[in-house]
């Protein structure tokens, strides 16, 4: 059955809905099961935004906040939350369910974070769950080159969080970053061992971070994120990663202007993975690794397709990148000699745009191509495998020719890079 209120004024309707805990608006449910509804005074985006503001003002840790479908104009005055200017604070144990709602900002608004954790202590086991949309201040289909002018505008910013979940959201048109993670060093004592523990940081699942300056940025020791089934398309940069131990599974980063995946030298960087998924048709780089990022990163079963020999480039100025079982039709590029060895093994080269012609001899020596193939045979740029009777016979110059298979005087066979 349904309830239709036809003879009451809008204010009376609001009161009736509030007393019954139904209708459009925002409902806050406490851990003890009690609930309060915050109903807009009118059927407008602004009124819905004010109802959301009232709900968050009353919410405490471990509350569940449910939005009903509709557009919510986020015009709330900002405050400083964990060092970030933001509208809404995520509290310990809080669950926010958008239920199809769209929260948006206008181009005339002050750039800010929509949601942020407070960052002063561990914020544990919180969730923001869709379906729903967080929409920044730039209009849909606007020129992506205009983004990046208001770097404080962030959809969700996490500080010192553990066991959090961001699921089923679209984050788009942010001049800053769709999802941003900062410090994950926890100043609290818990079952993980206190301030040094960074494990179980969080999960991002089935999200779309598109049309932003940066789709996702994970910085400042914000490690151990698991990101699955998500897209980072048509941003200036899809994924900007300083932190280590970041795992992408079944994700895509396509059509980004500068980088699909940028891996920075952040101290304890790298040693993450991109499994499955694809990085196609990015104007600049599909993968771009800074110098001294030597802790490695694994790409397995992933696809890399460009539009020319100058797009969707793969670059490592560091070392330890391992591409295994991938499909590659992108050029390899280096603006300087990498600091470590990178490998591509057991992969299929489609044969149109994949090239190593932009690599100097010294840059080429830092890339090892092993057991790769095309439709018709061995990848032409695979390294030559040469067997030597002894290590001394191999000499030092052979490294420039690629992978060397050497046989010691004891008869053992091993690979030397």
Image: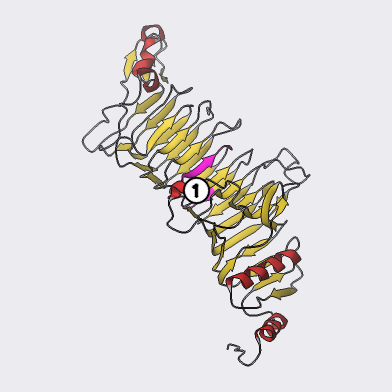
Indicate the quadrant containing the C terminus: top left, top right, bottom left or bottom right: top left
Name the outermost residue toward the front: 108
| Quarter of the rendering containing residue 183 | top right
Residue visible at 76% across and 62% down in the picture: 60
Label 1 Cα neighbours within 10 Å, binned few <14 / some 14-19 / many ≥20: many
Looking at this view, is 88 or 266 the one in front?
Answer: 88
How far across and down, in percent of the image, does residue 234 sit? 43, 50
Secondary structure of residue under mark 1: loop
Q: Please, is residue 30 above or below residue 175 in the view? A: below
Q: Is residue 280 left or right of residue 127?
A: left
Which is nearer the eye, 215 or 374?
215
Q: Relative to 111, is 352 above or below?
A: above
Give the residue at x 74% y 72%: 33
Q: Is residue 254 visible?
A: yes
Q: Is 150 above or below relative to 320?
A: below
Can residue 235 be seen by looking at this rendering?
no
Q: Quadrant of residue 89?
A: bottom right
Left or right of 375 in this view: 115: right
Q: Which quadrant would the N terminus be assigned to in this image?
A: bottom right
Would you name the residue on which mark 1 appears? 147
Give coordinates of residue 262: x percent, y percent: 49, 38
Residue 222 in magenta stretch: no
Query: Start and end of the magenta stretch?
Result: 227-244
Question: Which quadrant would residue 19 be assigned to in this image?
Answer: bottom right
Tell me the residue at 41%/35% (across/down): 323
Residue 409 picture location, percent across and down: 40, 9
Q: Is 41 situated above or below 240?
A: below
């Amino acid at each position: 059955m349904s309830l239709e209120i036809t003879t009451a004024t809008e204010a009376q309707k609001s009161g009736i809905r509030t007393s019954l805990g139904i209708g459009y608006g925002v409902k806050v449910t406490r851990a003890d099961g009690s609930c309060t509804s915050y109903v807009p005074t009118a059927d407008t985006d602004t009124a819905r935004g004010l109802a959301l503001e009232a709900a968050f003002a009353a919410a405490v840790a471990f509350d569940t906040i449910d939005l009903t479908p509709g557009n919510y104009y986020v015009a709330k005055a900002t405050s400083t939350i964990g060092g970030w200017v933001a509208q809404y604070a995520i509290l310990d144990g809080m669950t926010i369910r958008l239920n199809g709602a769209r929260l948006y900002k206008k181009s005339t608004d002050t750039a800010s974070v929509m949601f942020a954790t407070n960052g002063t202590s561990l914020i544990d086991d919180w969730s923001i769950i869709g379906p729903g949309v967080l929409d920044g201040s730039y209009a849909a289909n606007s020129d992506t080159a205009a983004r990046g002018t208001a770097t404080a505008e962030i959809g969700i910013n996490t500080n010192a969080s553990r066991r959090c979940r961001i699921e089923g959201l679209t984050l788009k048109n942010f001049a800053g970053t769709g999802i941003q993670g900062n410090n994950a060093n926890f100043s609290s004592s818990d079952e993980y061992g206190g301030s040094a523990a960074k494990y179980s940081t969080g999960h991002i699942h089935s999200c779309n971070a598109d049309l932003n300056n940066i789709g996702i940025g994970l910085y400042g020791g914000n490690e151990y994120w698991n990101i699955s089934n998500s897209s980072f398309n048509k941003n200036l940069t899809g994924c900007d990663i300083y932190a280590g131990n970041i795992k992408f599974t079944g994700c895509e980063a396509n059509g980004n202007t500068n980088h699909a995946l940028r891996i920075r030298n952040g101290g304890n960087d790298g040693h993450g993975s991109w499994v499955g998924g694809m990085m196609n048709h990015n104007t600049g780089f599909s993968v771009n690794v800074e110098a001294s990022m030597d802790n490695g990163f694994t790409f397995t079963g992933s696809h890399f397709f460009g539009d020319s020999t100058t797009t969707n480039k793969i670059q490592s100025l560091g070392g330890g990148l391992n591409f295994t079982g991938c499909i590659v039709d992108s050029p390899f590029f280096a603006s300087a000699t990498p600091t470590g060895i990178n490998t591509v093994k057991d992969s299929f080269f489609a044969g149109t745009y994949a090239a190593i012609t932009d690599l100097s001899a010294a840059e080429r020596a830092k890339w090892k191509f092993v057991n790769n193939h095309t439709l018709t045979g061995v990848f032409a740029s695979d390294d030559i495998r040469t067997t030597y009777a002894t290590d001394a016979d191999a000499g030092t110059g052979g490294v420039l020719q690629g992978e060397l298979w050497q046989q010691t005087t004891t008869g053992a066979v091993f690979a030397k890079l």
